Amino acid sequence: MRPSTVIENVHGRKVFDSRGNPTIEVDVFTEDGFGRAAAPAGASRGIHEVVSYPEGGVEQAVKLTRELIAPELLGLDADDQETVDMVLHEIDGTQDFSKIGGNTSYAISLATASSAASAKCIPVFQQLAGAMTKELPHPLGNVIGGGKHAGGKAPDIQEFLSLPVKAESFAESLSANIKVHKEARRLIESRDGSFTGGKGDEGAWAPNLNSEDVLEILSTACATVSDQTGAEVKPCLDVAASSFWEPKKKHYDYRRDGLRRDTGEQIDYLLGLIESFNLALVEDPLHEEDFEGFAELTEKAEGCLIVGDDLFTTNRERLTKGIEMGACNAIIIKPNQIGTLTDAYDATRLAKSANYIPILSHRSGETSDTHPAHLAVAFGCPIIKTGVVGGERIVKLNELLRIEEALGPRGRIASLKIR
C-alpha cells in the first residue's frame, strides 16, 4: 500500500541559529510522515537575495505560517514538490518573497520534501533525485576567517578555504580538510604570538594577520597535508568583495592592510594571488554588480574556478546574464537566497547546462539541520561548502559520511577538473 504523503498540518516556530539570532523552523506532517527544517542566515548577504522575513520579523513569519500559509497547503501532496513550491509563490504574490519571507518559504519547502521522504522511509536525497543518485561532493572548508565572519584585526578577505580536489572518497576528503584546519592552527601560533585560538562564525581561525600572511599559512598547510595523505588539497578564497567595495569612491578599501585598489588593480591583485598560491577557486572576487570585471577575471584566470555568490544569489535571471557575458565558471547555490527547492534546483540545472560548477553552500549563521548534505547529493553538486569543524557544520559533513556509507559500492566522489 502506497504511504500517504498528503499534507495534514504545517506548524512554524521561532528557534535560534548558530549566532544566537532568531530564525524560523517548520514542521510538516502527513498521515505517514514528518519533516522539519529551519532556515539559516548569512552575514554578508547579496542585495539581490529574496527578503528573509516579512515586516515584523520571525514572529510575523510564524504567524503567517499558521494563519495564511498552512490552510493553503493542507491537502496538497508533499510528494509533488513543484506544486507545493508554486503554491508558496502564489500565496506570497511578490517577486522577492517580501510578503511571507524567503526563509519562511525555504523552511516549508524543505520540510515538505523531508516529510515525503519520511513517509516513504527513504533519505531526502533519494526523495529529490531518485535511487540512481550516486555522486558525493568534495568538501570546501573555511580554515581561516576574516571580514564580516571574524571582525577585530582579522584579514580583510572573508574566507581562506581548503579544497581536496583528488581523493578516493568523501571520507578521505573530509579527513584531509580537518588535518589542514589543525595544521593551520599550529602555523598561526608560530606566526602570531597573540593568537589564543579564537574562531569566527564558521569555526575558522581568526588571527591578527594580513591576507597574504594568512595565504602563506594556508598554502603551507594544504601542501603539508597533501604530502601526508596523498589527497591533493588546494587553497581557495572567498573574497566577499562587496563588503569592502566603496561605490562612490570606486575602489576596494582593504582597511586591515591599509590599501585601496580600483577595479583594474583588484583584478591584477587577484591574478597575482591565483598564480603565486596556485589557488583552485576564488569566490566573489569583485562586487556584486560588476559582471564585466567577473568576465575579465574569468577569462584571464585560466584553470581557476571564479565563483559567483553575491553576483548571482541563486537567481536564474542573474545567472543567465552571467552566462551570456562569460562572468564566472561556477556558482554558489544557497536555496534560502531564492526561497524554494524548486527555484534552487532550476538555477543548478541552468548552471550545469552552461558548464558552470554548482557549489551547494551553507550560511554563516547555520542551524543543526543536515539537509544541505542531502541537497548537495540530490542536486549533483560536485562541491559542498559547509565548513570544516563546529557543531552546526560537522553535522552536515557527518551526514555525508552516512550517505556515502548508504550508497556503498555504487557511490563515488565527483570528478573535478581544476588547475
Image (spheres, rainbow, N blue to C red):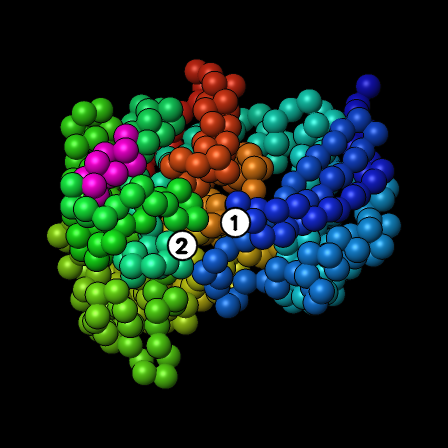
266 or 194: which is nearer to us? 194
In terms of secondary structure, what is the magenta stretch mainly? Answer: helix
Disc 2: which residue: 149
Q: Residues within 10 Å of mark 2 (few under 14, many from 20)?
A: many
Tag 1: amino acid:
Arg
Disc 1: which residue: 19
**Quadrant containing the C terminus in the rendered view:** top left
Residue 193 position, x and y percent, is: 19, 46
Task: Please indicate, yes or no, whether residue 273 appears anywhere in the rendered image.
Answer: yes
- Between the C-alphas of marks 1 and 2, the distance is 11 Å
Q: How crowded is mark 1: few (under 14 residues within 10 Å), some or many (20 or more)?
A: some
Residue 363 position, x and y percent, is: 49, 49
Tag 2: amino acid:
His
Task: Please indicate, yes or no, whether residue 157 appears anywhere in the rendered image.
Answer: no
Identify the residue at horizontal 26%, vertical 65% (top origin).
256
Identify the residue at horizontal 70%, vertical 67% (top origin).
55
